[in-house]
Image: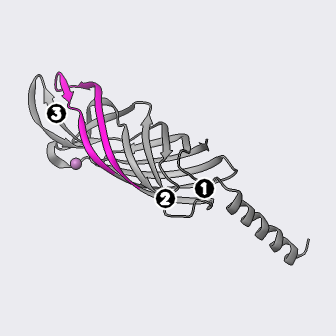
């Protein structure tokens, strides 16, 4: 195949990919399954560090229109070591479900669908363990902002990458006494495969 017809074929394929792509429309559901990494940016309050963890991540999106979606982020429980002065002093598990409103600026026919999102996070901590004693981390409500993109690889299948920045602060108690508030404020990164119903 010469260069000219090759570029014609590639051009046609790109056009086909762009136009055959899933056209998001009101009532569409998109389910995405992948890996999600939660990387806390624990800041000084209590002088603690919280390490990162990767789990199975799930997002479900319901399209209210071709440009606006509602997304729920869920995952299997994340487990984090809690570190003080370089030494592990405990660990905790947490679930951070996040409900967001998304805006997709591209035309519905585009194969490439970037979006921005803003939402509300609820994080519950459980299975806390600590050398300090009976340790409890309070549940947290906070705001979340995010960006992501879908790329259609067929009418229904897509690949997705997304990042959320979530405000998570938790009040820490040891043996029934409050010892302070710990900022967790993680960045969540997820890469997934999606299906558009
Ligand atoms: Ni915070």
Quickly name the residue at label 1: 151
Question: Is label 2 within 8 A of ligand 1 (CB to nearest ligand atom)?
Answer: no
Instruction: Look at 14% across and 29% down and name the residue there.
Output: 173
Is 121 in front, or is 67?
Answer: 67
For the residue carrying disc 3, how many other residues have a C-alpha within 10 Å: few (<14), some (14-19), or many (20+)? some
Instruction: Look at 34% across and 35% down and name the residue there.
Output: 80
Q: In this view, does 2 lie to the left or right of 197?
A: right
Where in the figure is residue 165, as x and y percent of width and height? Answer: 34, 51
Which one is in front in this view, the residue at disc 1 or the one at disc 2? 2
Q: Does the magenta stretch include residue 83?
A: no
Where in the figure is residue 20, as x and y percent of width and height? Answer: 71, 57
Identify the element where label 2 is drawn.
loop
Is 4 in front, or is 40?
Answer: 4
For the magenta stretch, what is the residue range? 117-144
Label the magenta part by its dominant secondary structure: strand
For the residue carrying disc 2, how many other residues have a C-alpha within 10 Å: few (<14), some (14-19), or many (20+)? many
Residue 10 figure quarter: bottom right
- How far apart in space, not on screen, are marks 3 and 2 (Cα)? 38 Å
Question: Looking at the image, is 158 positioned above or below residue 103?
Answer: above
Quickly name the residue at label 2: 104
Question: Is label 1 within 8 A of ligand 1 (CB to nearest ligand atom)?
Answer: no
Where in the figure is residue 129, as x and y percent of width and height? Answer: 26, 24
Outermost residue toward the right in this view? 1
Where in the figure is residue 118, as x and y percent of width and height? Answer: 35, 53
- How far apart in space, not on screen, are marks 1 and 2 (Cα)? 12 Å
Question: Looking at the image, is 107 positioned above or below residue 92?
Answer: below
Q: Is residue 139 magenta?
A: yes
Q: In which quarter of the image is the N terminus?
A: bottom right
Image mark for residue 172: 3
């Amino acid at each position: 195949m010469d260069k000219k017809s090759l570029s014609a074929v590639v051009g046609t394929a790109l056009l086909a990919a762009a136009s055959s792509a899933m056209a998001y429309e009101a009532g569409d559901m998109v389910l995405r399954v992948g890996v999600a990494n939660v990387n806390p940016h624990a800041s000084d309050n209590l002088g603690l560090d919280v390490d990162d963890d990767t789990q199975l991540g799930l997002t479900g999106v319901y399209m209210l229109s071709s440009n606006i979606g509602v997304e729920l982020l869920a995952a299997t429980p994340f487990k984090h070591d809690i570190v003080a002065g370089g030494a592990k002093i405990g660990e905790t598990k947490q679930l951070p479900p996040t409900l967001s409103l998304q805006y997709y600026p591209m035309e519905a026919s585009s194969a490439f669908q970037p979006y921005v999102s803003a939402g509300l996070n609820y994080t519950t901590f459980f299975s806390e363990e600590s050398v300090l004693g009976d340790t409890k981390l309070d549940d947290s409500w906070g705001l979340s902002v995010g960006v992501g993109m879908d790329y259609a690889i067929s009418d229904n299948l897509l690949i997705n990458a997304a990042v959320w920045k979530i405000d998570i602060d938790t009040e820490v108690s040891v043996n029934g006494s409050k010892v302070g508030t710990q900022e967790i404020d993680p960045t969540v990164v997820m890469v997934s495969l999606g299906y558009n119903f």
